[in-house]
């Protein structure tokens, strides 16, 4: 009798889950609660070139940030 095969279980990640998390991140960035918005801004600073922006700059641009930007943040966090 042979030993049972073991499989490495990878975390479940689907596009639907990523999109849902990205929408929540955008909602936090656009929140009226300044603490939540600043926490979301720190997450956006993980994107290349955005970490050098002064604090509060992304909050001024929050109406222009799109789902594709939030998806890039979610995917960058998944790689870490």
Image (cartoon, rainbow, N blue to C red):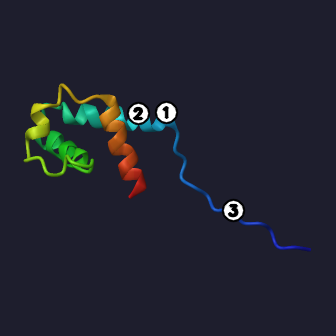
Q: Could you say where residue 33 lies in the image, as x and y percent from the top left?
A: 13, 36
Q: Could you say where residue 30 lies in the image, as x and y percent from the top left?
A: 19, 30
Q: Secondary structure at mark 3?
A: loop
Dot 2, how many residues are within 10 Å of its Cα: few (below 14), some (14-19), or many (20+)? few
Q: Residue at x 19, y 46 (%)?
A: 50
Q: Residue 57 is drawn in which quadrant?
A: top left
Q: Residue at x 20, y 26 (%)?
A: 64
Residue found at the very far front of the displayed protein? 49
57 w.r.t. 66: above or below: below
Marks 1/3: CA distance?
A: 25 Å
Residue 41 falls left or right of residue 16: left
Residue matched to label 1: 16
**The C terminus appears in which quarter of the rendering?**
bottom left
Q: Could you say where residue 59 lies in the image, as x and y percent from the top left?
A: 12, 36
State if disc 1 and disc 2 touch (CB < 8 Å).
yes
Dot 3, how many residues are within 10 Å of its Cα: few (below 14), some (14-19), or many (20+)? few
Residue 35 falls left or right of residue 76: left
Residue matched to label 3: 7
Query: Which numbered dot is residue 20?
Result: 2
Residue found at the very far right of the displayed protein? 1
Marks 2/1: CA distance?
A: 6 Å
28 w.r.t. 74: above or below: above
Q: Secondary structure at mark 2?
A: helix
Residue 56 falls left or right of residue 6: left
Marks 2/3: CA distance?
A: 28 Å
39 w.r.t. 24: above or below: below
Q: Secondary structure at mark 1?
A: helix
Q: Residue at x 23, y 36 (%)?
A: 28
């Amino acid at each position: 009798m042979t030993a049972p095969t073991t499989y490495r279980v990878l975390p479940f990640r689907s596009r639907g889950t990523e999109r849902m998390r990205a929408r929540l991140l955008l909602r936090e960035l656009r929140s009226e609660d300044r603490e939540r918005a600043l926490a979301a801004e720190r997450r956006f600073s993980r994107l290349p070139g955005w970490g050098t922006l002064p604090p509060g700059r992304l909050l001024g641009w929050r109406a222009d940030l799109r789902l594709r930007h939030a998806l890039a943040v979610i995917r960058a966090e998944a790689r870490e």
